Image (cartoon, rainbow, N blue to C red):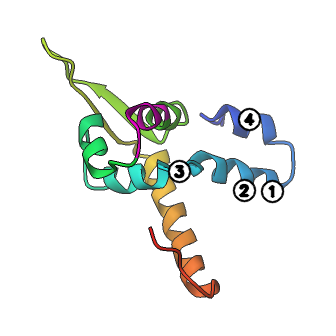
Amino acid sequence: MVSPWPEVRRWSERSTECSAQVAVNLIHGKWKTRILSRLRHGPTRLGELRRILPQASKKMLAQHLREMERDGLVVRKNLSGRVLHVEYSLSESGGYAALHLISMLQHWSNEHLPFRTKE
């Protein structure tokens, strides 16, 4: 089976540590976990993400969304008529798997770290 992620194909002959790094890299980014968490609740437009995450610039959110679309975590759906209307949603395979990975990391953090950082 061919992986949809170019990085995975490139690292496939190396150790499991490399595979773990590829998985972490997919969700690495200041806003990616927050975007994925929001998309858990359904399709979302860029403008809505900007209202939910006012500290994030439009450029950074768009960049993260493009990266996550490229990596198979997010699906971009163009619903444009006369006005540009684009929604983003989780992909059935990669997006929900990434949420599971984030959940496992949260659980590990709650169990093993002596403190929790404030978000």
Report the residue marked by disc 1.
Answer: 16
Report the residue marked by disc 3.
Answer: 30
Q: Earlier in the sequence, mark 4 or mark 1?
A: 4
Q: Secondary structure at mark 1?
A: helix
Name the kind of residue labelled 3 in the image.
Answer: Lys
Q: CA distance from mark 4 to mark 2?
A: 13 Å
Residues at badges 1 and 2 in contact (C-beta under 8 Å)? yes
Q: Residue at x 57, y 69 (%)?
A: 105
Give, as a single range, the part of the protein colored magenta: 56-63
Q: Earlier in the sequence, mark 1 or mark 3?
A: 1
Q: Residue at x 34, y 50 (%)?
A: 53
Determine crowd level at label 1: few under 14, some 14-19, many 20+ residues with C-alpha closer than 10 A.
few
Residues at badges 4 and 3 in contact (C-beta under 8 Å)? no
**The C terminus lies in which quarter of the figure?**
bottom left
User: Up-down: is 2 above or below 32?
Assistant: above
* Residue 43 in view: no
Q: Secondary structure at mark 3?
A: loop
**The N terminus lies in which quarter of the figure?**
top right
Q: CA distance from mark 4 to mark 3?
A: 25 Å
Residues at badges 4 and 2 in contact (C-beta under 8 Å)? no
Report the residue marked by disc 2.
Answer: 20
For the residues carrying marks 1 and 2, which lies nearer the camera in this image?
Answer: 2
Report the residue marked by disc 4.
Answer: 9
Name the kind of residue labelled 2 in the image.
Answer: Ala
The image quadrant of residue 44 is top left
